[in-house]
Image (spheres, grey):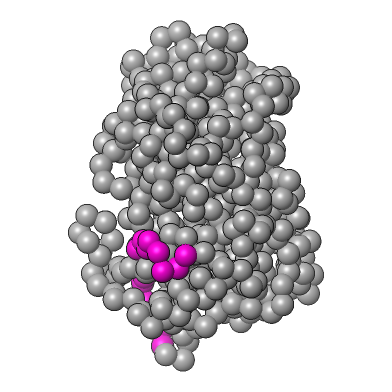
């Protein structure tokens, strides 16, 4: 769309509906997801391919000037921070450049143990990986063997946090609450939401227009290759969770010969037809299933929570709470949108099952303040570059730029009305969060065809069977596309981010792969990790 188009100033305030950009995320705030000829291929004879090769060469020569991290970054010694310079547009590598923030914790083993750097992406799009090195400094027992052999490397992807952050709305406005109830009661409600979504898209252009055409997964994959070169690594060792799996899939397609070891955990379906409109519809179905799993668990533990001894009774309590918050927002700030932002962490992560049920139980017992404290927006989350607003902006920018989205409101309305009938928990909230893509102000790309390329080693794929944010079919699809890969399935489980859980069947294979490169002769199905206890 032309830059001379008339643009409305963003007016997203307390009436806005954006919930939280966490639906593809591997690291969300609650305990606490690309291109053909236009965007090019990292390994083809395109201008982008030549650009990334030149940027990587320059990065290899410059290296990274590692220093103590800035005090306000919250990353204490011995973690070190630095910068890697990349072009905004890989087709013009001598043009405008940005700096990407990176950090590291050095390996804890001997020189003989050392195997290089392990680079991490937690998901999003919009998630920061800068906390990854703390797995070493806090001596996380799940990563002791691997940190003995690898430097742990985190980074803020382009547009995120300290890496040329983008914005779509004033952060102070973004956190205002309560927002509109995501479930529309009339056509008038839908018109308001459509207007807000269009204004949000315009706000992205007003505040970050120069970056928007370049906020794509293939460009982030190219950035990843420049980071590899800056680290002095001939090949990349990579761990990606949630959206980070799609980043890994695109990297593995563009740079198959640059991969040494790659683990993808909780996998986005990389099928071109799935990116990204269909992916969000599939989430709506999967979230409903995992929401019911959590309700069944709450009912089975009624002696602890007193929310009902059947799923139907727990659901009745939820609907009662939702209706009350719609009529009179709790504490003046927690309406249905804020409730969904808080409660969605239960279908996301088993680690949230007890905390969410406990707060819900306290509310039913008469303690409203506990729920307000848990679900109200963090009004301090507006300072600096790391904010909910920035994460939401990057989520929107990447998903809207990666692929062509439907522009017909009739299609959005028809698809989401149909899904809402059977899968009401997340459907409309998800729809409004993504609707800015229907009026996106810059050209949308065609997703890359993810496939095996020359030199790609076996990739380890890890997935729980009932994952809500990245449904199981995504792991199957990537497994079929990456020949020689191995799939580890955690059956009867649905927590997002399997490699962070205690399950020796998974943990031992992750260690073995990263330490030896070996994979099982065939795919493996593991028993589930331990169910949370009240």
**In the displayed structure, does residue 426 sit left or right of residue 86?**
right
Instruction: Give the magenta-colored segment's residue range.
Output: 92-110
Image-based side of 529 in relation to 229, left or right: right
Q: Residue at x 25, y 72 (%)?
A: 67
Residue 16's quadrant in the figure?
A: top left
User: What x and y, as percent, mark residue 158?
Assistant: 43, 56
Q: Nearer the viewer, residue 531 or 352?
A: 352
Picture mark count:
0
Image height of 158 relative to 111, above or below: above
Q: Residue at x 36, y 34 (%)?
A: 169
The outermost residue toward the front is: 4
**Residue 39, position as x, y percentages in the image:** 59, 58
Q: Position of residue 270 (x, y in %)?
A: 69, 53
Viewer-nearest residue: 90 or 70: 90
Picture layout, residue 20 above or below residue 11? below
Task: Name the residue: 36% across, 79% down.
Answer: 63
Residue 327 placement: quadrant:
top left
In terms of depth relative to the viewer, which is nearer, 88 or 116? 88
The stretch drawn in magenta includes residue 102: yes
* Residue 153 coordinates in the image, percent (x, y): 42, 69
Foreground pick, 228 / 472: 228
């Amino acid at each position: 769309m032309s830059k001379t188009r008339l643009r409305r100033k963003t007016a997203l305030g307390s009436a806005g509906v954006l919930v939280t950009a966490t639906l593809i995320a591997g690291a969300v705030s609650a305990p606490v997801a690309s291109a053909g000829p236009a965007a090019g291929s990292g390994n083809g004879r395109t201008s982008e391919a030549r650009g990334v090769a030149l940027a990587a060469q320059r990065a290899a020569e410059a290296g990274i000037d590692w220093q103590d991290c800035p005090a306000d970054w919250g990353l204490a010694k011995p973690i070190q921070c630095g910068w890697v310079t990349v072009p905004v547009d890989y087709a013009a590598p001598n043009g405008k450049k940005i700096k990407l923030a990176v950090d590291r914790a050095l390996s804890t083993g001997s020189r003989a143990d050392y195997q290089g750097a392990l680079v991490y992406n937690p998901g999003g799009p919009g998630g920061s990986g800068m906390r990854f090195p703390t797995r070493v400094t806090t001596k996380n027992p799940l990563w002791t063997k691997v940190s003995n052999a690898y430097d742990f490397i985190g980074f803020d992807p382009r547009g995120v946090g300290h890496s040329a952050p983008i914005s779509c709305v004033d952060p102070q406005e973004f956190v205002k609450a309560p927002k509109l109830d995501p479930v529309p009661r009339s056509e008038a409600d839908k018109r308001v939401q459509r207007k807000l979504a269009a204004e949000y898209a315009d706000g992205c252009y007003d505040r970050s227009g120069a970056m928007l055409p370049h906020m794509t997964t293939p460009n982030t994959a190219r950035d990843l290759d420049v980071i590899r070169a800056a680290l002095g690594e001939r090949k990349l060792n990579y761990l990606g969770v949630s959206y980070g799996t799609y980043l890994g899939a695109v990297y593995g397609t563009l740079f198959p010969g640059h991969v040494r070891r790659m683990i993808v955990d909780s996998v986005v379906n990389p099928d071109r037809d799935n990116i990204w409109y269909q992916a969000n519809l599939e989430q709506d179905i999967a979230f409903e299933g995992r929401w019911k799993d959590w309700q069944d668990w709450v009912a089975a533990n009624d002696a602890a929570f007193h929310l009902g001894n059947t799923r139907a009774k727990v659901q009745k309590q939820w609907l009662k709470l939702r209706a009350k918050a719609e009529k009179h927002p709790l504490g003046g700030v927690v309406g249905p949108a804020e409730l969904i932002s808080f409660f969605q962490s239960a279908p996301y992560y088993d680690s949230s099952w007890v905390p969410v049920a406990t707060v819900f139980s306290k509310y039913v017992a008469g303690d409203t303040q506990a729920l307000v404290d848990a679900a109200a927006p963090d009004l301090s989350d507006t300072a600096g570059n790391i904010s909910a607003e920035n994460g939401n902006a990057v989520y929107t920018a990447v998903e809207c730029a990666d692929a062509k989205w439907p522009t017909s409101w009739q299609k959005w309305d028809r698809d989401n009305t149909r899904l809402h009938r059977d899968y009401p928990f997340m459907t409309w909230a998800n729809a409004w969060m993504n609707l800015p893509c229907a009026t996106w102000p810059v050209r949308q790309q065609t997703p890359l065809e993810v496939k095996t390329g020359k030199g790609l080693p076996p990739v380890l794929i890890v997935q729980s069977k009932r994952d809500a944010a990245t449904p199981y079919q995504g792991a199957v699809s990537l497994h079929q596309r990456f020949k020689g890969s191995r799939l580890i399935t955690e059956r009867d489980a649905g927590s997002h981010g399997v490699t962070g859980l205690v399950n020796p069947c998974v943990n031992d294979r992750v260690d073995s792969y990263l330490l030896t490169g070996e994979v099982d002769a065939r795919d493996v199905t593991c028993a589930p990790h331990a169910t949370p206890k009240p």
